[in-house]
Amino acid sequence: VPTHWEVLPNRSTFCEVINCGHSKQQMLSVTIAQGVIRQKDLLEERSKKDGSRHDKNTYKLVEPGDIAYNKMRAWQGAIGVSQHRGIVSPAYIVQRPRNAALSPYLHHLLRTRAFAWEAARWSYGITSDMWSLRPEHFKLIYICLPPLHEQIAIARFLDDESAKINESIANARCQTKLLKELRTRLIADVVTGKLDVR
């Protein structure tokens, strides 16, 4: 860790938020792959059904910039900063950074393998399927905090690089689809005699 960075326990960086009674807000999901996203986007993407309870008065409100995590899956990376206002299951934990400017950097930091290892170390349960990162143990984990201007630069760099990688992945998927179509057409043309292979 660079000497000018602070290393602080989460209890000095976050405060837990339990704000219920907002049942009309949109549902959010905390995923391993993407962090906090709108549940409707997840359901469309995976053709899943809404498994949430009909009565959502006990669901917790998440504001933009809040951290939400699935306490049973934090050690696998189910954590992130929300860009949306919405509600999450009462089983999830909502933490608010004491300084809102930290949120973009914290999103990347809390989704690293190093944080996942710490989450696993502080989680309790008989087997890994039952490990739970309780709020009181989340507060005991130490994190690295560079000066604010460095946090902004780090978050911007990672956002830009992630966008480039996502674009490359999308292009590769498109090319793969085209190649599969070409292969299918080639097979059809050869077996029907449209293409002479002699």
Image (cartoon, rainbow, N blue to C red):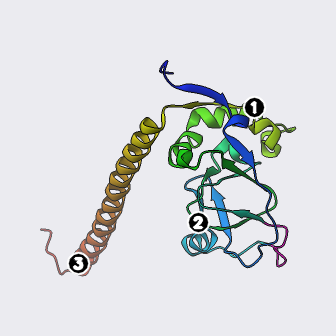
Which residue bears the numbered disc 2?
84
Q: Secondary structure at mark 2?
A: loop
**Picture residue at 69% right of the left edge, 45% below the top:** 74
Left or right of residue 7: residue 176: left
Q: Which residues are magenta?
A: 53-59
**For the residue marked with disc 3, what is the amino acid?**
Asp
Residue 131 visible in image: no
**Picture residue at 28% right of the left edge, 63% below the top:** 175
Dot 3 alpha-carbon crowd within 10 angstroms: few under 14, some 14 to 19, many 20 or more: few
Query: How far, Cα to Cα, is label 2 from label 1?
Result: 27 Å
N-terminal of the pair, mark 2 or mark 3, is 2
Above/below status of 145 relative to 34: above
Dot 1 alpha-carbon crowd within 10 angstroms: few under 14, some 14 to 19, many 20 or more: some
N-terminal of the pair, mark 1 or mark 3, is 1
**Residue 149, position in %: x, y?**
42, 38
Query: How far, Cα to Cα, is label 2 from label 3?
Result: 50 Å
**Residue 171, position in %: x, y?**
30, 61
Which residue bears the numbered disc 3?
189
Query: How far, Cα to Cα, is label 1 from label 3?
Result: 65 Å
Left or right of residue 159: residue 47: right
**Picture residue at 32% right of the left edge, 55% below the top:** 168
